[in-house]
Image (cartoon, helix red, strand yellow):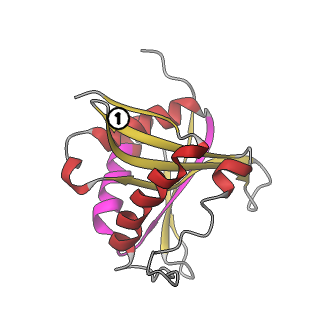
Amino acid sequence: MKASLRIAREYEKNIVDNLLQFYLDEISVFVAPKKSAEGRLIYPYLDHYWRNPQRYPFLISNDKQIAGFALVRREIDPSNGMEVAEISDFFILSTLRNHGIGGLTAVQLWDMFPGKWRLEVHKANQGALLFWKDTISKYTDHRFKQSINAESINIEFRFQNTIRQS
């Protein structure tokens, strides 16, 4: 298995959008996405990933086959005014899960953007919560913060990374 990721080019936006249909359908158990007149699920921020220099669309591959996507953004954290990176959305095709692709590509993303990270997961999405807690814990050697805001539907993970020496 050779998991990898790369920036999605603008002409590949349709590939990300098609993968988003599977992703949005899966998470519709937790949140209700809007649909277009044609019946496609809408991700309202997709165009921003090619227009905003602080947003990064990635395609994930496994042995040169498309396996999923990751959407990363950098922004100013309103809680402290510092820059933070965030995986806003992340998806691996269900047929390719549990083969290490997600963990490997998450680590690749974190290594690309050293600094402070924030990641939110819906409280009811137990599979994602287990995946992210385990992956972040291994990556940071258990040095992360997990918090639950009573007013939020999400659990938040925060950590600081530096480029690791292999």
In the rendered structure, the answer to whether residue 56 lies left or right of residue 77 reads left
Figure quadrant of residue 127:
bottom left
**Would residue 143 be visible to someone looking at this image?**
no
Residue drawn 43% across the image and 48% down it: 69
**Residue found at x 44% / y 53%:** 90
Find out whether residue 87 is within the magenta segment: no
Name the one closer to the observer, 58 or 37. 37
The residue nearer to you, when weighing 12 against 129, is: 12
Q: Using the image, determine if residue 164 lies above or below residue 26.
A: above
State the residue at coordinates (53%, 41%): 8
Please state which amino acid type lies under the numbered disc 1.
Leu
Residue at image point 40% right, 40% down: 60
Mark 1 closeness class: few <14, some 14–19, many ≥20 residues within 10 Å: some
Find the magenta span and give its range.
115-135
* Total numbered circles: 1
**Measured along the vertical axis of the image, is residue 128 above or below residue 113?**
below
In the rendering, at what x and y percent does residue 165 appear? 47, 16
Q: Which residue is mark 1?
A: 104
Check residue 132 for magenta coloring. yes
Q: Is 83 on the left or on the right of 31, as rendered?
A: right
Q: Is residue 102 above or below residue 18?
A: above
Q: Secondary structure at mark 1?
A: helix
Which residue ends up furthest to the right in the rendered image? 81
Residue 103 or residue 51, whichever sits in front: 51
Q: Quadrant of the C terminus?
A: top left
